[in-house]
Amino acid sequence: MLKREQLKNITPQEFRSLVREGKWTEDTTEICSGYSQANVVIVPKEYAFDFFLFCQRNPRPCPVIDVTEPGDPFPRLMASGADLRMDIPKYRIFKNGEIVDEPTDILDYWRDDLVGFLLGCSKSFVWALKSANISWRRYGAYQTSIACRSAGRFRGNMAVTVRSFSNSNDAIRAIQISSRHTFMHGPPIHIGDWREIGIKELGKPDPFNPYRPILEPPKPGEVIMYWGCGITPQMVAIESKIPFMITHAPAHMFITDKFVEELSVI
């Protein structure tokens, strides 16, 4: 059995080969140090323009970094030689707004009309935070009451990832650093009380996102910050009852060939 520590410093190409061979089906946290990870959304061509417009109108949770041609599973801009059908540890299949399967490849679901989108992920800029010697506690991803701007039949609320910082200096540095990474959600969309954006309780897993860590409530003086999250399209698929959509399973990301700094603004 492979251990996560063994995968921290391998290349994305090596990691994707392991995924294709079925040797890794767990989440991608702390894997391929320094490389950008991506959320994945795959929709029929019929809905591709509406989804692209949805992303354009909601760039904080859905920053587009690559789009494939219909029927083409190869994201050539972000990862030469990669295959969206096999290179993600776990997928989610949505039909009419319901999760119907979580396979480790989508060969049986692939169609000639499917368009793949890669969206930036905050798992990428955490490498920059680590390089700046910033520490934090991660509370995972949550549904919020923040409404996204609709596009076509795509509508719903934003998801966020939550991190707590023990002091204001680390929090300010995290804002500065994440602001350089607009393709990875950019700066926080909210700071402070989670209840103000519709989150009922931090640290409690739910069926939609079972990969959330269980943590103690924030301590007095901690700074809590919230970034747009790439599982927003999954919430939208459920809310909008999209007939057919494929995504990554939460925390099981596509790892690109691009270093984090290659996609930074400055």
Image (cartoon, rainbow, N blue to C red):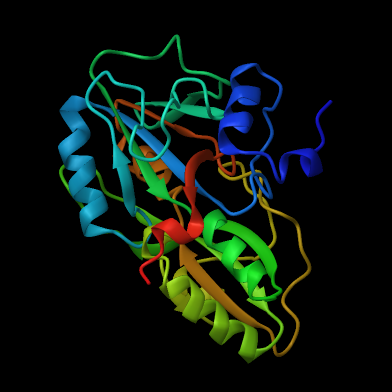
Left or right of 189: which side holds 171?
right
The N terminus sits in image quarter: top right
Tell which of 165 and 85 is nearer to you: 85
User: How far across and how far down the image is residue 47, in percent?
Assistant: 20, 32
Total number of numbered discs in the rendering: 0
Instruction: Tell me what residue is drawn at x 48 percent, y 81 percent.
Output: 176
User: How far across and how far down the image is residue 197, in percent?
Assistant: 45, 71
Q: Is residue 193 above or below residue 63?
A: below
User: How far across and how far down the image is residue 51, in percent?
Assistant: 23, 41
Q: Quadrant of residue 27?
A: top right
Can residue 83 be seen by looking at this rendering? yes
Left or right of 149: which side holds 176?
right
Instruction: Tell me what residue is drawn at x 46 percent, y 56 percent.
Output: 229
The C terminus sits in image quarter: bottom left
Instruction: Tell me what residue is drawn at x 59 percent, y 44 percent.
Output: 251
Instruction: Tell me what residue is drawn at x 62 percent, y 25 percent.
Output: 19
Q: Is residue 147 above or below residue 234?
A: below
Can residue 143 be seen by looking at this rendering? no
Q: Is residue 139 above or below residue 53?
A: below
Left or right of 17: which side holds 234?
left
Tell which of 34 and 103 is nearer to you: 34
